[in-house]
Image (spheres, rainbow, N blue to C red):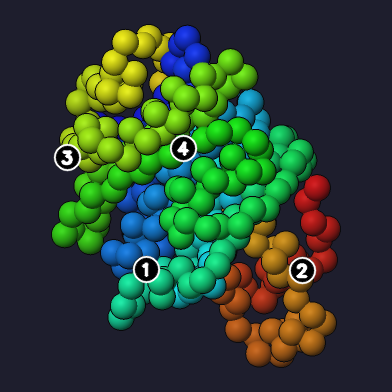
């Protein structure tokens, strides 16, 4: 089954929700960034919850989130569009020899979110990351900074095939609306991390009625509306031309060094790990151009 993303509403005092299966796109990200199992788990969770949060934005909006922690995990960045494109990075991508999650996250962290529309920043905010989990920390950001009660759950299962490491990845985000019954909302939020929802989110394959099963478990007597199905995908819009922008950040001394050595310059896109090789002539051309607006 292909990846998909649905947004909708639980009626009568309910909540807005997004639900996604992100197996293919998280596979692509994990392979591109050469993540180890711990890195793969973190990046898959972050991409999925970022995509779910972006889904509530309007047309042409993007949701950029950076999680920073003081432990071995330094940062994860996810850049997602409401239309379902997402890219992301994790630094570092591998975590050999860690004793526990305390070493992974350290003693503190921060979540920073920047929203934009049509390339212009419309809002930004920062909140402390207290939960030491990317999904819970982003949900907490949405509660604190946006003041919208939110709860998220992401489940990832892996294979032992390095070419297709993610067996299945899915996530669910609940967000309160102005007429939400908060008691009912909190009950549904708890259920996201309890049985039977945990098992439904962990099924090894996605059944046709997968979303209905989860909604039925969250609100047995409720009704809901589901919007159109979109197909999320990993997409980075980097290009040789955009790498020219990075080259223009080099100092004069660095530029002279490149010209004197007459060696090709290799630049990697942080978001997708694509490697670009530019000749000295291409570098000189880039330095003589202006940054695209
Ligand atoms: Zn890229």
Which mark, by number, is residue 192? none
Position above or below: 171 against 125: above
Nearer the observer, 126 or 77: 126
Disc 3 versus disc 1: distance between alpha carbons?
26 Å
Between disc 4 and disc 2, the foreground one is: 4
> Which residue is label 2 attached to?
248
N-term mark: 2 or 3:
3
SS of the residue at dot 3?
A: loop
Give x and y (percent) for residue 37.
Answer: 28, 64
SS of the residue at dot 2?
A: loop
Which mark, by number, is residue 204? 3
Which mark, by number, is residue 101? 1
Disc 4 versus disc 1: distance between alpha carbons?
21 Å
> Which residue: 36% across, 43% down?
154
Label 3 CB-ligand 1 distance < 8 A: no
Query: Could you classify mark 3 by the number of other residues whose Cα lies within 10 Å: few (under 14), some (14-19), or many (20 or more)?
Result: some
Horizontal side of residue 79 vs 241, given as left or right:
left
N-term mark: 3 or 4:
4
């Amino acid at each position: 089954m292909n990846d998909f993303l649905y947004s909708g509403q639980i009626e009568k005092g309910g909540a807005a929700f997004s639900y996604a299966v992100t197996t293919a796109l998280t596979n692509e990200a994990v392979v591109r960034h050469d993540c180890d199992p711990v890195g793969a788990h973190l990046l898959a969770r972050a991409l999925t919850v970022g995509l779910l949060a972006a889904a509530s934005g309007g047309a042409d909006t993007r949701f950029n989130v950076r999680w920073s922690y003081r432990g071995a995990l330094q940062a994860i960045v996810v850049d997602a569009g409401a239309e379902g494109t997402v890219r992301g990075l994790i630094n570092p991508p591998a975590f050999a020899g860690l004793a526990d999650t305390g070493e992974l996250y350290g003693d503190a962290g921060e979540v920073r979110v920047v929203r934009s529309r049509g390339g212009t920043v419309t809002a930004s905010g920062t909140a402390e990351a207290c939960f030491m989990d990317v999904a819970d920390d982003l949900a907490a950001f949405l509660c604190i900074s946006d003041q919208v009660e939110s709860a998220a759950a992401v489940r990832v299962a892996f294979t032992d095939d390095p070419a297709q490491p993610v067996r299945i990845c899915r996530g669910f985000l609940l967000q309160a609306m102005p007429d939400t019954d908060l008691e009912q909302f909190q009950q549904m939020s708890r259920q996201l991390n309890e049985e039977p929802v945990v098992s439904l989110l962990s099924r090894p394959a996605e059944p046709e009625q997968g979303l209905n099963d989860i909604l039925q478990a969250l609100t047995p007597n409720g009704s809901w509306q589901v919007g159109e199905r979109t197909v999320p995908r990993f997409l980075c819009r980097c290009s040789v031309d955009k790498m020219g922008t990075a080259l223009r950040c080099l100092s004069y001394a660095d530029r002279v060094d490149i010209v004197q050595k007459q060696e090709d310059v290799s630049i990697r896109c942080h978001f997708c790990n694509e490697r670009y090789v530019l000749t000295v002539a291409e570098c000189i051309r880039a330095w003589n151009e202006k940054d695209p607006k």
